[in-house]
């Protein structure tokens, strides 16, 4: 039976267990496709952990914060004008709220403090500083140069 090699395109299901106790899973959805050895935004730090696996096999990888969503960076705590948020938008301290970035894309920031017309926000990734346990099940393997077949 064929085993995963670096550069192969594969389909996987995952369960992510975060240091804060929260869990995210791809179960119940279509498997995600990735290239073994390349960074993937949903599965940071996975790297070459799938090499040698056969379809149906699973592996668990412990990923430190540096390789997961990076350590929390104090320089990403910023002071913004209250006018950057919609006037009627509540800004509860400690909560994550949506905001449009300068490119017009929606992202989440954590409200740290409100100082009159200034809002102190944390723009780090919401998982920054957390280690990650990643359980990955290999569903299918495709060669490095072949595109996976579409699945229903």
Image (cartoon, rainbow, N blue to C red):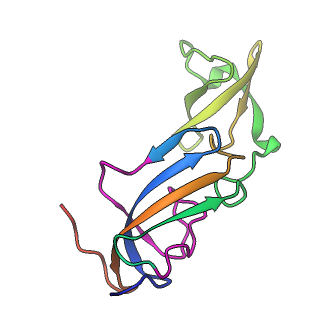
Q: Residue furthest left?
A: 152
Q: Quadrant of the C terminus?
A: bottom left
Taking the spot 44% from the left edge, 78% from the top edge, the residue there is: 53
* Side of 78 where 15 appears, left or right: left
Q: Main secondary structure of the magenta part?
A: loop
Taking the spot 57% from the left edge, 35% from the top edge, the residue there is: 108
Taking the spot 69% from the left edge, 42% from the top edge, the residue there is: 124
Magenta-drawn stretch contains 44? yes
- Of 114 and 87, nearer the camera is 114
Specify whether residue 70 is in view.
Answer: yes
* Residue 78 higher or lower than 150, as above or below: above
Specify whether residue 105 is in view.
Answer: no
**Residue 72 position in % (x across, y down):** 75, 45
Taking the spot 34% from the left edge, 70% from the top edge, the residue there is: 56
The magenta stretch spans which residues? 25-52
**Residue 86 position in % (x across, y down):** 55, 19
């Amino acid at each position: 039976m064929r085993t995963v090699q670096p550069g192969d395109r594969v389909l996987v299901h995952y369960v992510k267990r975060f240091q804060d106790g929260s869990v995210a899973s791809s179960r119940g959805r279509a498997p995600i496709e990735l290239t073994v050895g390349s960074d993937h935004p949903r599965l940071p730090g996975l790297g070459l952990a799938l090499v040698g696996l056969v379809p149906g096999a699973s592996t668990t990888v412990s990923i430190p914060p540096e390789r997961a969503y990076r350590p929390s960076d104090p320089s990403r705590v910023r002071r913004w004008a209250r006018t950057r948020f919609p006037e009627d938008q509540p800004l509860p301290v400690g909560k994550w709220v949506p905001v449009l970035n300068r490119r017009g894309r929606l992202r989440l920031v954590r409200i740290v403090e409100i100082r009159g017309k200034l809002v102190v926000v944390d723009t780090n990734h919401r998982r920054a500083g957390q280690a990650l346990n990643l359980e990955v099940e290999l569903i299918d393997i495709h060669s490095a140069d072949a595109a996976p077949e579409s699945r229903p």
